[in-house]
Image (tube, rainbow, N blue to C red):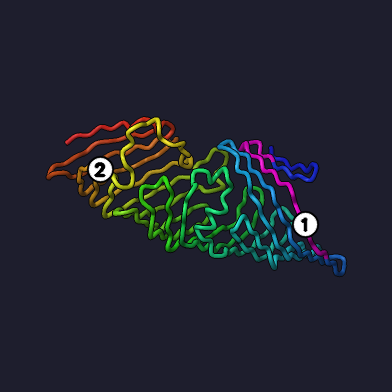
């Protein structure tokens, strides 16, 4: 059961089923209220939230701040809310909403909203991360920008979700950290989200001599019910990957840095690489199927060519135990 409490100027939201708590303190609210004919109300102003903490089973996120500038009209006779201005700035990233909600006092409310972001740069994303989240990105540098546009249209009621759509465009991205042997450059791609399905189109990057392109879909992003996990179907293609350059061999497993698990999703897909270098071995025409569930990655039907001969096999890596090498079986 979820609940919201207010105590000593602090607002606390508790989501018991998900084990998450959101606590907001140090609030500053400045607003003007205008009333006409007793039924038309307009409010405009600013809300500053200077201390936001999110407590999750995976670990807390603290040091967040937000600012909300708004200009909202309410017509109690028509049961409508019109949003002329709703600008949310979370850390250094801004999102604007405009639109309306009608029938808010009925069993079914209709929502018509458009969403747009300012150009969000990778520098802002890194700079806006809370200290405890950004600890693993110490010394990170980024470039490039992300633009987000979206819309929410349709009825909302118990068991009924409106249509949600959004597009995300990433251009001219670059990322480097002290832990990356080579920087990621030429990062670009497009993501379209519609009705709980994200379609990834040609998300590509370069890392030193290597290149990578990813396409696919991720479904069940939301609305899948308790325990539902996102399901990804991904295809990865590359002209050349130099594993020795982007992931040098680990000589001492005890020195592996703390590992943040991948999102808990169900994933399957296909990997195709024209050329690769692994442990000074040159491979060509590498193909394999991949799958991940419960943080266990399986590579099956591995097929490659080396020195004129064929290599095939399987590999399994439990991401919950990255200090041990993957279990492999090869032939050829």
Secondary structure mainly formed by the magenta segment: strand
Q: Is residue 154 magenta?
A: no
Sort mark 2 into few (<14), some (14-19) or many (20+) by Cα contacts within 10 Å: some
**Badge 2 vs badge 1, beta-carbon distance below 8 Å:** no
At 20% from the left edge and 46% from the top edge, which residue is drawn? 283
The residue indicated by pointer 2 is: 278
Q: Quadrant of the N terminus?
A: top right
Sort mark 1 into few (<14), some (14-19) or many (20+) by Cα contacts within 10 Å: few
Res. 10 image quadrant: top right
Mark sitting on residue 131:
none
Q: Is residue 17 magenta?
A: yes
Residue 85 lies left or right of residue 193; in this view the side is: right
Residue 113 lies left or right of residue 31; in this view the side is: left
Res. 7 image quadrant: top right
Q: Position of residue 68 (x, y in %)?
A: 69, 59
Residue sticking out furthest to the left: 308
What is the secondary structure assignment of the residue under circle 1? Answer: strand
Q: Position of residue 239 (x, y in %)?
A: 26, 55
Which residues, given as a range, are shown in magenta?
A: 14-33
Q: Position of residue 257 (x, y in %)?
A: 44, 37
What is the secondary structure assignment of the residue under circle 2? Answer: strand
Residue sticking out furthest to the right: 38
At 74% from the left edge and 45% from the top edge, which residue is drawn? 11
Mark sitting on residue 29:
1
């Amino acid at each position: 059961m979820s609940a919201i409490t207010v105590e000593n100027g602090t607002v606390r939201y508790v989501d018991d089923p998900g084990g998450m708590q959101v606590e907001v303190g140090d609030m500053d609210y400045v607003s003007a209220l205008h009333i006409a004919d007793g039924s038309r109300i307009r409010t405009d102003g600013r809300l500053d939230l200077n201390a936001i903490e999110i407590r999750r089973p995976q670990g807390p996120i603290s040091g967040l701040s937000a600012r909300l500038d708004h200009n909202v009209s309410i017509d109690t006779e028509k049961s409508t809310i019109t949003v002329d201005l709703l600008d949310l700035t979370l850390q250094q990233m801004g999102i604007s909403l405009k639109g309306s909600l009608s029938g808010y006092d009925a069993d079914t409310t209709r929502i018509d909203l458009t969403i747009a972001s300012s150009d969000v740069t990778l520098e802002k994303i890194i700079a806006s991360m809370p200290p405890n989240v950004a600890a693993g990105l110490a010394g990170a540098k980024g470039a490039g920008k992300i633009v987000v546009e979206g819309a929410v249209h349709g009825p909302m009621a118990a068991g009924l979700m409106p249509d949600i759509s959004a597009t995300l465009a990433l251009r001219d991205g670059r990322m480097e950290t002290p832990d990356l042997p080579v920087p990621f450059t030429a990062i670009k791609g497009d993501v379209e989200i519609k009705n709980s399905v994200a379609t990834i189109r040609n998300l590509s990057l370069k890392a030193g001599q290597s290149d990578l392109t990813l396409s696919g879909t991720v479904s069940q992003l939301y609305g899948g019910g308790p325990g539902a996990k996102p399901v990804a179907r991904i295809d990865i293609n590359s002209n050349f990957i130099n594993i020795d350059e982007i992931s040098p061999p680990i000589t001492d497993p005890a020195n592996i840095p703390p590992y943040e698990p991948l999102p808990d999703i169900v994933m399957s897909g296909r990997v195709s690489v024209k050329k690769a270098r692994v442990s000074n071995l040159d491979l060509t025409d590498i193909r394999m199927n991949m799958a991940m569930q419960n943080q266990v990655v399986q590579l099956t039907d591995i097929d490659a060519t080396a020195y004129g001969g064929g290599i095939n096999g399987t590999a399994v890596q439990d991401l919950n135990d990255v200090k041990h090498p993957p279990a492999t079986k090869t032939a050829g």
